[in-house]
Each structure stands twice: as structure tokens, then as C-alpha cells.
């Protein structure tokens, strides 16, 4: 690390947007004086936060856990 600066660990993602949405995203970032990455990170964080407090999403998560649990149990039984 140069100069002792802390570097946050990040994960790179490829995001495909239709040209009109990409143009609007760039405009928002420019108007706000931020990077496109900052705007996208904030939007994703907000989306995930809303989902975590959504009862319908919580039901989907529980159903997914149950389904995967049964699958994993069946795989473990096959190993014995």
C-alpha cells in the first residue's frame, strides 16, 4: 500500500444496461458530482436494505432455505 493508504476490498461486477438507462445513470452521476460506481453502489445497497425488511422477500428466503436444506440432506444421505 502506497503511503499507508487503506484499500477497501471490493468485488468487480459486469453490469449490462440498455443505452438509454446507461445515459440516464451517467447524467445522475454527473449532476451529483459522483462516479457512476458510487451511484450504482448506493442504489444496490438501498435495494438490498429494502428487501431485508420486506415480509414477502423473507418468505421467499425461508422457502429457499427449506428447499436447499432438503436437497443438501438428500445429498448427504447418498454419501452414507
Image: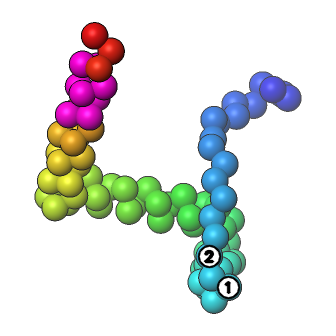
Q: Quadrant of the C terminus?
A: top left
Q: Is residue 67 left or right of residue 12?
A: left
Residue 64 x %, y %: 24, 46
Q: Quadrant of the N terminus?
A: top right
Q: Is residue 20 left or right of residue 67?
A: right
What's drawn in magenta, residue-wise?
70-77
Which residue is rendered at x = 63% and y = 64% of the image? 15
> Is 7 placed above or below 18 here?
above
Residue 75 x %, y %: 30, 25
> Is 67 placed above or below 70 here?
below
Residue furthest to the top: 80
Residue furthest to the bottom: 20
Mark 2 is surrounded, within 10 Å at the Cα level, by few (under 14), some (14 to 19) or many (20 or more) other residues, namely: few
> Is 45 placed above or below 73 here?
below
Q: Is residue 55 visible?
A: yes
Which residue is rendered at x = 64% and y = 36% of the image? 8
Q: Is residue 32 left or right of residue 75?
A: right
Q: Is residue 34 visible?
A: no
Which residue bears the numbered disc 1?
19
> Is 57 placed above or below 8 here?
below
Residue 49 x %, y %: 33, 55
Q: Residue 67's mark?
A: none
Which residue bears the numbered disc 2?
17
Q: Secondary structure at mark 1?
A: helix
Q: CA distance from mark 2 to mark 1?
A: 6 Å
Residue 54 x %, y %: 20, 60
Amino acid at each position: 500500500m502506497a503511503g499507508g493508504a487503506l484499500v477497501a476490498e471490493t468485488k468487480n461486477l459486469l453490469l449490462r444496461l440498455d443505452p438509454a438507462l446507461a445515459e440516464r445513470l451517467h447524467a445522475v452521476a454527473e449532476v451529483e458530482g459522483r462516479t457512476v460506481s458510487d451511484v450504482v453502489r448506493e442504489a444496490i445497497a438501498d435495494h438490498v436494505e429494502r428487501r431485508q425488511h420486506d415480509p414477502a422477500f423473507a418468505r421467499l428466503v425461508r422457502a429457499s432455505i427449506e428447499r436447499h436444506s432438503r436437497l443438501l440432506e438428500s445429498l448427504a444421505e447418498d454419501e452414507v
